[in-house]
Image (tube, coloured by chain):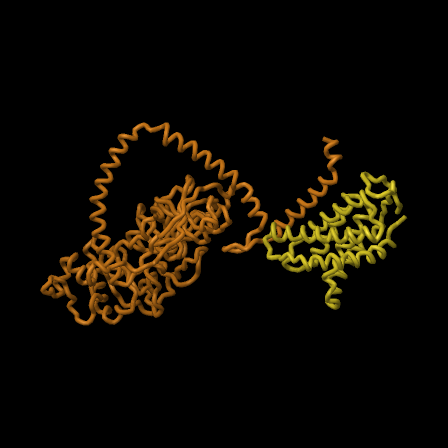
Amino acid sequence: MDTFIGRYRNLIVLAAILFAQIIGLAVQVRRPTDEGDTRLIRIWAISAVTPLEKSVVHSQEWVQNLWTSYVYLHGVRRENRELHAEIARMKIEDARLNEDALMARRVQALLGFKEQYVDSTVAAQIIGTSGSDQSRALYIDKGSEDGIKTDMAVITPTGIVGKIVQVAPEWSQVLPINDQFSGVGAALKDSRLQGILKGTPNGATTLQYIMSDETVKPGEDVITSGGDRIFPKGLPIGKVVSVAPGKDLFLNIRVIPSARLDQLEEVLVVTKITEKMPDTKDLGPLRASDILAERLPGIPDKTSVDAAGNAKPETPGAPGTTAAANPATPGHPTISVMKPATGASTPAPSAGTTPHAGTTGAATTGVAKPKPAGTTATGSRPANAGHPVVPTPPNNRAETPSEAPQQHVKSAPESAPAAPVEPQSTPPAGGPPQ
Amino acid sequence: MSTRVMPFRGSVTSREQVSVYEFSWPAIILIPLIAVLMQIFIPVKVRFLPIISLPFLVTIFFATARRNPISGCLTGCFIGLLQDLFAGYNHPLGMYGISLTVVGFLASSLGVKIDVDNPGSRFLITFGFFGVEEAVYYGVAHGLLRQAVQWNWSHLAISALANAIIGIFVFRFLDRFKER
């Protein structure tokens, strides 16, 4: 050993000096990336271990695949029969849902909604974590060479996972929704209340900025609201597990994510989302009143029916705008068009982009942070002031069912042509991931 | 303080032995510092001076005079980092350090084998090692740091020639600081 060191002493010293200077360079230099500058040494370090992690993960997957696909096939035949039966049942279900979807698209088209579709995704494997309790960050094996960019949504079939925060050519870093620096625009599926889903330092997720006078029940589904412009609207997030009074007039709602964030192996990165108007060319010139006449037996009392059987609004000159919801009819999609609340001079962005009461502030994802109560003009429903649209489930809204339709009918001719509107029914989910 | 005599190993010269010079500490510190400061401040007035790389010439001088690769490494590292310190806000420390470390090592290694005290060999060594320094710098900037640097053969040749010519006079001046 001594002979070796003595013989190559000069080269060893040269290598040591060069190595020290290269490390020094890597510490100083920041390489510009989409999300900002990243220290070169961090990129080098992760790039150095990424092939090892990839090989370990891929080897494990190969062995597991070999076992499950070629060796352990117990019960496959029985499972195949069951699946065929399931497919047959689902085809029937699919036909019924298609019918409902057609109707929903017609309604959306009439109301000028844009739908968000997940156009393309990239499958990726989790190859590493931050290894720290302070950060829940994950590393996936796809990077900019695969079309990954920052702020892309990361999902699984069961629910959303997080978003891309850092991209290298061959790997990316994911900020999961239970990270304390994460924020996702979220909504409660049934009550349509909107808030921000944030992570906590201990890895839990809470839905914040829901006013304490609202009614939220454990077990209610939480979906994306689309307000953060990252996740398409309507993707599942999780379920409410507990509701407690919080500070500053907001509820403390704990949510358990649908995706098993601690057991993730593969994820989908949403690389393309398109917003487009629903295609209604072949659906015929239906109007909202037509659909309501078809769906709601109570409405024709206020409308006249033409010879073809199509329901027409009673008030002329406001086609398709004055149809008021019948709040007592659950299970049917309803349409309400309402004049914006007092003081809401700024028109709202497209449907679902505004959090529950919010106009100011931004979380880490850019989700608008709601204003606290008292900042709104009306006072009676501070959380909704500023919303030109009031999709009003009767159980936890201030207006009574009998008042709401009157208000709608009264304001509709004046506001309907310009005011954005929002359906009360379940929103058109952002399309199934492909 | 003193001049040591060491045998040539694989010498290509006819001499049996070659002198190894040493320098006083003030010379070791002040000469590179002055060279770097001149390199920084004089081009404000003398536009063509950036072609001449005084820190590079000083590195070659110390490395060939001492004829010790480790000493050459450290000298090149010290002078290069000193040059990096003044090289601008966006210039990372170590780019010149790495290139002059390599040059110092190679020059002192070569100095063990050939006589580097006559003007002809000094001209050739300076001319050749200038290309080495530029190549290493380009490799660091372009390969490691992905910086947008350009390789210009004609500019390199002119600079190498100018440094080789100026180097002869600079080395003759610096010979005065050798201690025998």
**Which colour is chain B painted?**
yellow
Looking at the picture, tell me which residue is in the foreground, A91 or B85. A91
| Residue at 43% over, 47% down | A178
Query: Where residue B14 sits: x, y (%)?
Result: 86, 42
Q: Please say if A202 is above or below A284.
A: above
Residue A204 in view here: yes
On screen, residue A369 versus residue B1, left or right, reads left
Quarter of the image where one finds residue A329? bottom left
On screen, residue B125 versus residue A85, left or right, reads right
Total count of labels: 0
Looking at the picture, tell me which residue is in the foreground, A7 or A148. A7
The residue sitting at the left extreme is A307
On screen, residue B84 versus residue A433, left or right, reads right
Query: Where residue B100 sits: x, y (%)?
Result: 72, 51
| Residue at 49% over, 37% down | A55
Query: Where residue A275 sits: x, y (%)?
Result: 34, 58
Quarter of the image where one finds residue A346? bottom left
Residue A252 in view here: no
Which quadrant is the N terminus of chain A positioned in?
A: top right
**Which colour is chain A painted?**
orange
The residue sitting at the right extreme is B180
Query: Where residue B137 sits: x, y (%)?
Result: 67, 52
| Residue at 23% over, 66% down | A408
Looking at the picture, tell me which residue is in the foreground, B112 or A94. B112
On screen, residue B13 versus residue A78, left or right, reads right
